[in-house]
Image (cartoon, grey):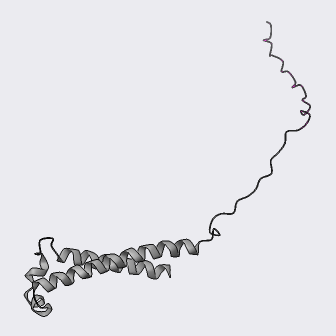
Amino acid sequence: MNTFIIIAIIIVSVALIGIVLIQNAKGGGLASNVGVSSQMFGGVKKQSDLVEKITWGLIIALFILCLGSGFSFNAGSDGSDQAPRVQVPAQSAPATPPATSPLPTQATPVAPQQ
């Protein structure tokens, strides 16, 4: 399910990029230069309305898919994918310090007399 949502987000994003590149804020852009499509859709005004509706539809679809992916990814993880926590018991200090033995002292070497 997560793979499907990711692929759908990528497809909608690429389509949205293409639609935004086609339109222009002033009504020009690539869509106004295409004569055949303006005749097919019934004029430039209807075509710009159609491009705007497609843009808003893709934006809404992308928003819904992103929200759905957030819920889907969080619902799939119940914390089991995390490393288990290990409880280490607290160690108490010994009641009596360990007995220490004196270290043997090392004799300093004496230089031989001649």
Q: At 44% from the left edge and 73% from the top edge, which residue is drawn?
A: 67
Tally the numbered discs.
Answer: 0
Q: 29 or 27, which lies in front?
A: 27
Q: At 8% from the left edge and 81% from the top edge, which residue is drawn?
A: 33
Q: 76 or 58, which lies in front?
A: 58
Is 78 displayed left or right of 57 in the figure?
right
Q: Position of residue 31 (x, y in %)?
A: 13, 81
Q: Is residue 26 depicted above or below 97 in this figure? A: below
Q: Position of residue 65 (x, y in %)?
A: 41, 77
- Please report the bounds of the magenta region as a residue range: 93-114
Where is residue 8, by image quadrant?
bottom left
Q: At 12% from the left edge and 91% from the top edge, which residue is drawn?
A: 42
Residue 12: in sight, yes or no? yes
Q: 98 or 30, which lies in front?
A: 30
Q: Position of residue 113 (x, y in %)?
A: 80, 7
Is 49 displayed left or right of 68 in the figure?
left
What secondary structure prevails in the magenta region?
loop
Q: Position of residue 76 (x, y in %)?
A: 57, 75
Where is residue 49, by image quadrant?
bottom left
Q: 36 or 82, which lies in front?
A: 36
